[in-house]
Amino acid sequence: MTTLLYTEVEEELRAAVRDLLADACPHSAVLARIESAAPYDGDLWKALARDIGAAGLLVPEELGGAGASAREAAVVLEELGRAVAPVPFLTSAVVATRALLAARTAGPGEVVDDLLRRLASGEATAALAVSLAASPYRRVGAEVTYEPADGDAAVVSGRVAGVAGAEIADVLLVPARLPERDESALIAVETGERGVEITPVTSLDLTRPVAMVSLGSARGRIVARGVGADAGGSIVGEALRFGAGLLASEQLGLAEWCLAATVAYVKERRQFARPVGSFQAVKHRLADLWLEIGGARAAARNAAGALADGDPGTAVPGPVAVAVAVAVAQAHCADVAVHAAEECVQLHGGIGMTWEHPAHLYLKRAKADQIAFGAPGEHRAALAGLVDVPAPV
Amino acid sequence: MTADATWNEAAVRERARAFLAANDPAAMDRLDFLRARFDAGLAWVHFPEGLGGLGAPRELQAVVESELRGTPDNRPGRIGIGLGMAAPTILAFGTDEQKRRFLRPLWTGEEVWCQLFSEPGAGSDLASLATRAVRDGDEWVVDGQKVWTSVAHTARWAIMVARTDPDVPKHRGLTYFVCDMRAPGVEVRPLRQITGEAEFNEVFLTGVRLPDSLRLGAIGDGWRVAQATLMNERVAIGAASGRRTMIDVVCETWRSRPELRTHDLHQRLLRLWVEAEVLRLTGARLREQLAAGRPGPEGSGMKLSFARLHQELSGLEVELLGEEGLAYDDWTFRRPETVDFVGREAGYRYLRAKGNSIEGGTSEILRNVIAERVLGLPSEPRADKDIPWKEVPR
Ligand SMILES: Cc1cc2nc3c(=O)[nH]c(=O)nc-3n(C[C@H](O)[C@H](O)[C@H](O)COP(=O)(O)OP(=O)(O)OC[C@H]3O[C@@H](n4cnc5c(N)ncnc54)[C@H](O)[C@@H]3O)c2cc1C
């Protein structure tokens, strides 16, 4: 059985990420950046790639990566969540990388290996061109079509709304279908190509804004064929499930920060000649939140472990175990992060409503994360089938 | 070398097999088998040698249980208070003589234990209790009333806290005793519960004489000893929550009775399924931490989460049954020996689960504990903290 604890190596990785973020990503810097023209912090991302090897964490060593597993990526996400860091780790180093790794398993080729090398070195950043709200349970890619050109080349057209990390991406991985055929492909399109338009959307989450991606006969190279026919088992579906499972660790980090910041505040803040944290109405809410977060830690670790080696200790053995671990983690952690951020705002009183205080960054991220890769209700609905709790007939 | 290092999985397995080879349960009296098992150190392997254990790491108990599966057990449901609370307290605070006298029949189930803590005037505020124990030569004379005492009617012994010094603040004047439930002056009366039966009792103590050899821990140190008991109580209740019984019960009904399903119940059941799984994982993680020698504060939360989950699931089960939920299996005023949670029907489970957030520390008190001891939030103002117990207004 995999462990639900953190290994020493993971704790060292955590410490390194945390140190770097403490220096390079204080709340003041995040607050200053959110309304700027560059909402994603390219310098911080480079530092994470260079100093920690974060960009290539999941990429095999022979392609210049660290060859690490979902467990290590999860620890990085906890820390990035804790800092609401505006970097494309989840979108590029986790989801897009996982799509490429799945494509490599399905059919190795130079195109994929080249891309993975570029991502691992930090030289390029990628984004899977699907909505952040896409889930592993729904088919994606129906909006975009392609036409094969010479060799691996293809010409892609269509629009995808709600793409996270697109603004800072050098490469888009676009799921597209052949018109009037039941064939589909994952196509890598450089964002510098003619016909590629990325339009930022005013986003709820200021630290991971989404964009509209428009492709007008943009040239790209086919990375994998046959995706999308069965979204759940496909390359894209697998990448989304991987993202959903690891997002739970980001949600855990967000929630932990919210609880710690709130506890610290209510110990200091005095009203009625007492710290407000001595009032039982406040204490009990924080105790409940602490309990929820303890559960989130177990569920997030379990999902990361399941994704790392497909052998989680879930109650349901067999091939559905990974899917169950992910669905449980998202169904629980998404709501815990939102609850933590909401309590953080409420228990800070007026200061919690200000733009100047970082609480809103967490609230917005947590709320957007709740929708990302399938809302909790969608994961629960999936569980109905996975663990045999069927709907009424 | 530490005791832990001597025992590994293989050595314990070997020991269990050798024991079984020498003691055939089919050819032996049940109690003789259990006594032999205790003497072989296979009762609770983390206890010291000579006291039913091997001084081995606690998690190796699972190896013993799997090797001895199918052999007579000590009916843990009947002796939960002894196993979960009295035993660890006796082990931690008892004299050698007390350990030798009490632990073996406690574990074999020959002697049932109960817990004489709560009183009509002292529940959550246990330290305010009023039962008096007055020294008389080599004896103590106990007078007072205890209440909500589970299984007092089957108990041979009790763990009990009494006030030995009313002139100091409440926490300091308490002493911990083993009470002989057969001593003259101990009167046990059933208290009927909302389930119809009487698991618990009220216990009147009138001039009960206990030898000083039944004192557990130092005079005046009762609060500290009681804390150890209560911690073990919560761990014991929380550990049970690693099992998924209640969710399995409801899911079984759900699967086999499609005509009962509604969309609303489906949504709620899926939520609770997730909660049950998260709690199971939390428990698994906690056990890993314990095994690694890094106990986390999560333990104090398990009982609280377990109570809420149990209550919601048992409530949903009654609702799911619809018209059948209007019936109740049996209101007969009985005095059961065990809590038969799965053997009874939905209505019973619903009602009995209500006790989960009261027994062993209410959920409100547990939230206080988490807020103050884990999160470090300031405590409530306490009016009675520094004044002698007898001067506290009541
Ligand atoms: C099924 C069952 C079995 C039991 N078995 C035993 C047993 O074997 N031995 C034994 O000694 N006891 C036993 N008990 C007693 C149990 O430990 C007490 O009932 C419990 O500690 C609560 O005490 P109380 O009943 O006096 O309630 P009270 O302490 O009077 O509490 C009443 C309400 O006030 C709340 N409250 C109290 N103080 C605070 C506070 N500071 N902050 C916020 N809320 C507060 C409580 O949470 C509760 O909701 C059992 C109880 C039950 C239900």
Image (cartoon, coloured by chain):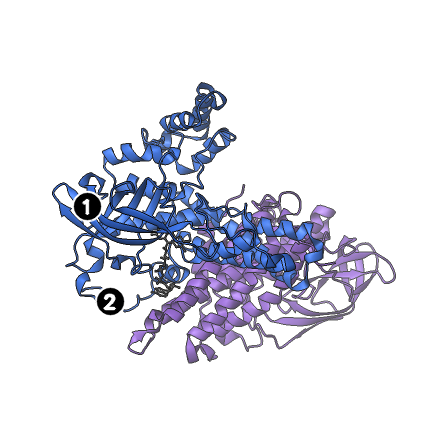
Chain colours: A purple, B blue
Q: Residue at x 35, y 46 (%)?
A: B152
Q: Name the spot of residue A213 as percent of width and height, x first.
A: 71, 70
**Judging from the image, what secondary structure is the residue with disc 2 in?**
loop
B247 vs A293: above or below:
above
Q: Which label sits on residue B394?
A: 2
Residue sitting farthest toward the front: B332
Subunit ID for the residue under disc 2? B
Front residue of A108/B358: it is: B358
Q: Which label sits on residue B218?
A: 1
Answer whether residue A300 is visible to the viewer in this image.
no
Q: Which label sits on residue A91?
A: none
Front residue of B74/A47: it is: B74
B201 vs A177: above or below:
above
Badge 1 density bin: few <14, some 14–19, many ≥20, Cα 10 Å:
some
Mark closer to the observer (2, 1): 2
Task: Tell me which numbered mark, 2 or 1, is placed earlier along the sequence.
Answer: 1
**Judging from the image, what secondary structure is the residue with disc 1 in?**
loop
Q: Name the spot of residue A256 as percent of width and height, x first.
A: 46, 62
Question: In the image, A388: left or right of B135?
Answer: right
A66 vs A78: above or below:
above
Ligand 1's image quarter is: bottom left
Q: Are marks 2 and 1 on the same chain?
A: yes
Question: How far apart, in angstroms, are the residues tagged by discs 2 and 1?
Answer: 28 Å
Subunit ID for the residue under disc 1? B
Answer whether residue B147 is visible to the viewer in this image.
yes
Q: Residue at x 63, y 58 (%)?
A: B320
